[in-house]
Image (cartoon, rainbow, N blue to C red):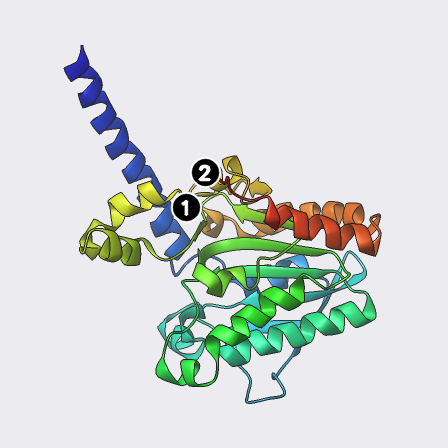
Amino acid sequence: MEKLERVQKILNKRLDSKDVWKKVILARMIERPTSLDYIENIFDSFIELHGDRYFGDDPSVVCGIGLLDGEPVTIVAQQKGRNTEENIKRNFGMPEPDGYRKSIRIMKQAHKFDRPIICFVDTPGAFCGMEAEERGQGEAIARNLMEIFKLEVPIISLIIGEGGSGGALAFAVADSVWMLENSIYSILSPEGFAGILWKDASKAREAAAVMKITAEDLKKYGIIDKVLKEPAGGAQKDVGKMSRVIKEQLIEKIGILRKRSKKELLENRYNKFRHIGKFLD
């Protein structure tokens, strides 16, 4: 009997691993809708704003003002390319310090003009090149995290593909954090995790299962607030349908958050992140 139980556990682990890895592949597909695809389908209009007022304009971060059902909102999004050429231009969705500084500049503008903020997260992680480190990558991400907690407007963050490490978290300190059904959200990539833990990046499939990076797992652990179901086969099968689902949910949630006082918004946002995890003495 014990032998049969051990075999069943091994089989279950393998099945789980395959299922999770399938979601990793879906989340990374080049055919998967990008932030700009959703912006085009969800908002009545969109005006992009550029520059961090320090160094330059990071094309991997798209910021601007849009109309959601007639209401002005601020949009902050990480943008991957739709093909190889565009991916090179967008640095494969990996923001540099200029991108994080641009995003917090636009979010502070939203605070000033009382506009809700909607963030689209889709990055394997912040760019880790030498030039990014020289310009203060860590400080830029940390400042985003610190400043977002002070913004007295509703913030909703939606992970649409990959949500990797602090590069994603800098856009995901929100009153409500959502994930698409086949997106992933983690402290680092499965390849990086396997390389650190087992010294073998080829074990990424097994690492993905151990890491609990799926929307279902993260909802269960209270890391995110909502999972949005995708069309059969993934969001890329019907971008219009997926966009309508997101739009309806955004309109409803912003209406709810608008009813809260500024003090209540800040307190709830702070407590939401303070209560994540369990501490044992």
* Residue 13 percent coordinates (x, y): 26, 32
* Residue 144 percent coordinates (x, y): 59, 69
Q: How many marks?
A: 2
Label 1 CA crowd tier, 10 Å (few <14, some 14–19, many 20+): many
Q: Nearer the viewer, residue 274 or 109?
A: 274
Q: Quadrant of residue 104?
A: bottom right
Name the residue that disc number 1 marks.
213
* Residue 84 percent coordinates (x, y): 36, 72
* Residue 62 percent coordinates (x, y): 58, 72
Q: Quadrant of residue 15?
A: top left
Whether tag 2 and tag 1 are in contact, CB under 8 A, the answer is yes
Name the residue rendered at 68%, 52% in the picture. 269
Identify the residue at the far front of this view: 281
Name the residue rendered at 21%, 49% in the picture. 203
Amino acid type of the residue tagged 1 in the rendering: Ile
Identify the residue at the far left of this view: 3
* Residue 47 visible in the displayed image: no
Name the residue rendered at 49%, 58% in the picture. 33
Q: Is residue 251 left or right of residue 226?
A: right
